[in-house]
Image: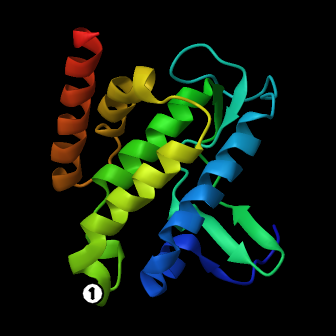
Amino acid sequence: MERLRGRDMLADLAARPWLVRQHARTLAGLHDRLHDLPAPPSLPQRYGAGDRVLHLDFHPGNVMLTPSGPVVIDWQNCASGAPAVDVAMVWVIIAASEVDVLPRRVRPAAALLRRALLRQFLAAVQADPAPALAAVARARMKDPHVRPAEVRRLNQIADRAERTTAGT
């Protein structure tokens, strides 16, 4: 393991929220580069078929901004699958996360910052998360680290995604 110098993207967003567009594009670029990688056969396959590397816990808190560039950390959930699944997981993590991970001074603007980050990320990333969104949101609800308020938001996301899918 290598010691990284810098701060994570979430801390940087809290300190410099005006960089939300730049950070969203960085997240999307890192994600697209990750999904260019074929998964090694040793990785477990999650959420159906697919042969790409998936991080499955990709969010601004897991991207370190170092002097040599951004570095994705926390690979314990990585798996093999379709890029849409990984992008859907980013969606549900950002959309449903608790605001108490941010400093108190930026919490009032957290919902606005979260929506801006998500909108910019989804506009820049290549994979379409819509087909996987409901399944990923429902699976995330089973994570023992997800708080009750997050479960409620995840349920809303899943319900909305299922209604949208049923309407098409």
Vertical placement of 12 versus 163: above or below?
below
The quadrant the N terminus occupies is bottom right
Name the image quarter holding the C terminus.
Answer: top left
Image quadrant of residue 147?
bottom left
Q: Position of residue 161 (x, y in %)?
A: 27, 26
Q: Position of residue 9 (x, y in %)?
A: 56, 72
The percent coordinates of residue 79 (x first, y second) are: 64, 33
Regarding residue 127, the answer to whether it shows in the image is yes
Tag count: 1
Secondary structure beneath disc 1? helix
Q: Left or right: 135 with respect to 150?
A: right
Identity of the amino acid at label 1? Answer: Arg
Residue 14 image position (x, y, % from top left): 43, 81
Q: Seen in the image, is 73 located left or right of residue 59? A: right
Q: Classify mark 1: residues with Cα within 10 Å, few (<14), some (14-19) or many (20+).
A: few
Residue assigned mark 1:
104
Residue lying at 41% horizontally and 50% vertically, measured from the top left: 119
Residue 145 visible in the displayed image? no
Residue name at image x 30 percent, y 30 percent: 138
Residue at x 65% of width, y 18% of height: 50
Q: Nearer the viewer, residue 48 or 142?
A: 48
Vertical relation: 10 (above or below) 50: below
Q: Say left or right for 152 vs 113.
A: left
Q: Nearer the viewer, residue 88 or 74?
A: 88
Applied colour scheme: rainbow
